[in-house]
Image (spheres, rainbow, N blue to C red):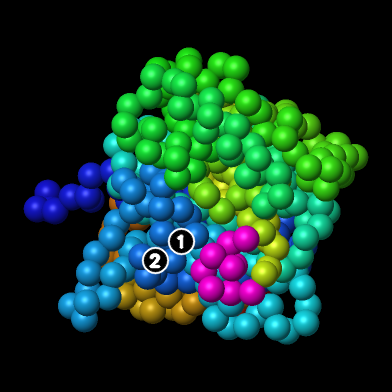
Amino acid sequence: MSTFKAPKGTYDLIPPQSAQYLAVREAIAAPLRNSGYGYIETPGFENVELFARGVGESTDIVTKEMYAFETKGGDRLALRPEGTASVLRAALEASLHKAGNLPVKLWYSGSYYRYERPQKGRYRHFSQVGAEAIGAEDPALDAELIILADQAYRSLGLREFRILLNSLGDAECRPVYRAALQDFLRGLDLDEDTLRRAEINPLRVLDDKRESVQKQLTGAPLLRDYLCDACKAYHEEVRELITAAGVAFEDDPKLVRGLDYYTRTTFEFVHDGLGSQSAVGGGGRYDGLSEMIGGPALPSVGWALGVDRTVLALEAEGVELDLPSTTSVFAVPLGEEARRVLFAKVTELRKVGVAADFSYGGKGLKAAMKAANRSGARYALVLGERDLAEGLVQVKDMESGEQTAVGLNEVVAELESRL
């Protein structure tokens, strides 16, 4: 046993389970790549202020969950707790918005970090795939991202997830609602921290998961009743576009999400098979975030889907992904000369795109064939001294057990055609 273990609340991705995570990432990314989104990768840590300004000083993410530290040079940095602020910062720094082709459409994949109580489906280190469309205010963009996420989940075989949809209004109508909500909250029996949060950003209180708080929120004013005409029309078009695409959703007037930068469209993907931690992803429009972090006005929309949560959702539905075998051909040499010849054939197979592995360590035939079985290979190549002298190699079908002799010079082409 090693002296060291993975830190509390984190996990290691190891084979064979890691193949499932890779397949989920690929399935989420595939529709994005087909829709004009280019890949972006940002550092694992950023200036603390980027998240304090963008995500929000009053959010749990910034006040309780962010891993912040000071470098030897005195810089205040934080491990990224989410992806949107980092991606927007990178796009602004590279002046992607000045290239004349808006929106800038980007997708990303990576690890994120939040200090919170570890539990099933919620880790201190987690993986997400995200997408951002920066620089355009268009209901079709909001609808596009929701439809692409739905497409990704369905391509994996998920069926029991739900899409929750709401509008958070804009700078015109939200202040009126904010004042009405604050008046309502001041009349409740809330603890000091929650009352302080209500004064900074009352929508955060609606997102409070404690039952003692939720019970008191019955009868709270709803934002949909305060939306201005422009926000109502925008939201209705988003709804119509999603409906026309055949994507089912549920209107949720209490949905606010846990970040301060959202405006207008906000949405969440939930799966009831995951218990209390039911969210598998979410997102929305963040028209003012660019200005919050020092950039120009760039209305934008995006989402992030949890890879870990999606894997748990697949397990909850009993969906088994059809994962390709990591090895198609396993080579078993018997003797030193056969070892050199067969290793060269394995290299040739790999060059033509056939997944091939080799019996390393000088194993005997029995142990080597056990390794071939464990590898999941469809075919085993067995080369002994007699076959070598005749210029042949034995090709064994690991499913049927049938074994045929093939010329050494023809075996690569033969396997390539079979596979």
Residue at horizontal 48 percent and vertical 15 percent from the top: 215
Which residue is the site of mark 1? 53
Give the quarter of the image for residue 253: top right
Q: Is residue 21 magenta?
A: no
Residue 104 is labelled as none
Q: Name the secondary structure under disc 2.
A: helix
Report if the CB atoms under discs 2 and 1 are less than 8 Å apart.
yes
Q: Is 4 displayed left or right of 229 in the figure?
A: left
Left or right relative to 130: residue 145: right
Q: Residue at x 41, y 59 (%)?
A: 52
Quarter holding the C terminus is bottom right
Whole-number angstrom distance, CA of label 2 to CA of label 1: 6 Å
- Left or right of 100? Residue 237 is right
- Mark 2 belongs to which amino acid? Glu
The residues colored magenta run 288-296
Q: Residue most toward the left?
A: 3
Identified at 22% across, 77% down, the residue is 74
Residue named by callout 2: 49
Residue at the image position 39 percent from the left and 19 percent from the top: 189
Q: Position of residue 323 (x, y in %)?
A: 57, 47
Q: Is residue 256 above or below residue 294?
A: above
Q: Nearer the viewer, residue 36 or 155?
A: 36
**Residue 392, position in %: x, y?**
54, 70
* 88, above or below 307, in the image: below
Q: Which residue is outermost to the right? A: 244
Which kind of residue does numbered mark 1 sit on?
Answer: Arg
Q: From the viewer's perspective, is residue 357 above or below residue 369?
A: below
In the image, 43 versus 385, the foreground residue is 43
Q: Nearer the viewer, residue 346 or 125?
A: 125
